[in-house]
Image (tube, grey):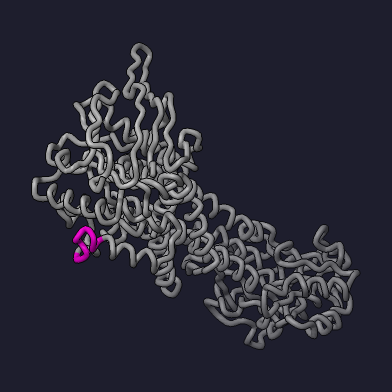
Amino acid sequence: MKVIEIKNLVKEYSDAEVKVKAINGIDLTIEEGEFTAIVGPSGSGKTTLLNLLGGLDKPTGGEVYINGTCINNLGASQLIDFRLNNIGFVFQAYNLIPVLTAGENIEFIMELQGRPRAERRKRSVELLRAVELLDRINSRPSKLSGGQQQRVAVARALASKPKFILADEPTANLDSVSTENLLEIMEVLNHEEKVTFIFSTHDARVVRKAHRVITLEDGKIKRDEGQGTRDE
Amino acid sequence: MIWAVSWRNIWRNKLRSTVIIIAIAIGVFAGIFTWAFYRGMVIQRIQAAIISESSHIQVHHKDYLTNPDQRYVITGIDSVIISIDNLPGVEATTGRLLVTAMISSAETGSGVRLVGIHPDQEKKVTNIYDKITQGSYFESHRKTPIVIGEKLAEKLSVKLRSRVVLTLQSMDGTLTSGLFRVEGIYRTYNSVYDETNVFVRQNDLSNLIGLDNSSGHEVAILLSDNDRLDLVSMKISEAFPGLDTKSWREIMPEVSLVEESMDISMYVFLGIILAALIFGIINTMLMAVLERVKELGMLMAVGMNKLRVFFMILLETVLLSLTGGVVGIIAGYIVTVFFKHRGIDLSRWAEAYEKLGYETVIYPVTNLDIDLKVALMVLITGILASLYPAWKAIQLKPAEALRIDI
């Protein structure tokens, strides 16, 4: 089942003098359960593509379909609701809410969805168990290591039961042990719960784990290797 | 959870938040305490004016107040007094004669308002008897006693038992005079009143001016409760349509004006304080928003809509303001209660205060209604102060905000 389908996607940045095509006519389909890495040199358009897939930015041309819905046509507030219910985000700098505990960070997303307190509590416990941080449920981010914070961020991204998770350089700030732990957890979630992961990365360890690797260069897909899930 | 987030966000920068909370607390404390002080001063002025000078209600001949000619008397004043005494809410009633006279001692003279009273009845209505500093309040059985104010005694250079001569117009228009002996000297909070009001027995005065005892110029009425003022005034007016019934508000419009303008003055005063504070609050919240651009971008990226982001910033600002406001109100209340019993002694400036008719020891008055109004004003200040920072927050674009490194 197609989770994402993009057609002839273009994103152009311009100022008074120069026009730059950060994404230059990309066609791409991502199926449910894929574990996809987007790689490429700096300035190749990785983050721009992720922002367009996540509805954080509007394309200059082309269309982005998520689960059959063309998100280009959604208004600003509709897009926010759409992101809340369909897309999970993991950021390079973790970006947890510093004044909330690990458990509250996860519950916060579900509260935005209007889910009842008991359900929020139950799911936050399940997710923290899945990322092996249940014992840190009442710890604030400042009391967690970088790797632990990123695992909480993954759990938070899963809290809303999204169609897929976008991760922008998720291991960029982690040491090798934390990177291994995080990748292992993401692989398990992908394999056992069919969670679709799409991440941009420079990290060779992450690329090695990916089942599909899309290489961007100058805003275009240069290579697309290993399309399909691990089971396939 | 958004309440918890907002509250905890306030304490992310403890020093900055504490500084603005203290600033708000000081401003609100100043407002609350000044209000309580001013209210106490005005209430004391009104109570003193009623109990020593005017009483709650006065009844006169219908032309007397526009032209205070001593011929405009209330005839059959005793029956008027009895009728009014029976009205519910009336504590005590007394009749008076009022004559303008010249009082002279061996050294000098002065114009005065001569009040002929029934001492026993007058004691129930006014408290001049309680303000006697020398001598007594018509307790001796000497002939033609007079009670004068301390200020007048100084002016005339007279002492107890000194003789003074009163020169006045009799009812037939001829000048007459009488010899009186100083039996008591009083001192109220109002030096102007003390210098211009002297008291004699009504019989002595009516004999002097040739007026029968069943007539008088004024009926003074003390009520059990000021809240009944309008109702009792209306009933007296209905019962005696031919007479002029006036409440203390009409008799002493300057005192009434002070009462009416008090709250407006204090709203303006507190409004100015809060208007100055609003800029400090805006600055604090703007810094809080600008420091959290990336976090706000993340919140919008993961699905927090603009209304919620706006509400979160508004809530933070309101909680910050209310924390300062509550601290200020509590501090104001505690200090007011302390001085409520102890009083604030302004006797260093006694002369100036007494000329204006104010007492020199002020007892501030606590008032829950005022505290709630101040809390409401702080709430409104918080909401107004939040608008610009909250608007700045919702202008952020998630993709751009997430790229910013702070």
Foreground residue among A221 and B122: A221
Q: Residue B289 vs residue A202: left or right?
A: right
Indicate whether residue A133 is drawn in magenta. Answer: yes
Predominant secondary structure in magenta? helix
**Depth check: B202 or A139 in front?**
A139
Horizontal and vertical percent position of residue B14: 26, 53
Using the rendered view, name the quadrant where residue A61 is placed.
Answer: top left
Q: Position of residue A42 (x, y in %)?
A: 20, 26
Point out the image quarter for the N terminus of chain B. bottom left
Front residue of this view, candidates B292 and A10: A10
Is residue B13 visible in the rendered image? The answer is no
| Residue sitting at the far right | B242
Give the percent coordinates (x, y) of residue A213: 22, 35
Instruction: From the top left corner, tell me how far across and down residue A216 is, in percent.
Output: 25, 27
Magenta highlight on residue B41: no
User: Residue, x 43% and y 53% (percent of image)?
Assistant: B315
Whether residue B59 can be seen here: yes
Q: Residue at x 86, y 83 (%)?
A: B79
Q: Nearer the viewer, residue A169 or B39?
A: A169
Q: Quadrant of the C terminus of chain B?
A: top left
Location of residue A174 (image quadrant) = top left
What segment is highlighted magenta in the picture?
A128-135
Residue furthest toward the front? A232
The answer to which image quadrant residue A185 occupies is bottom left
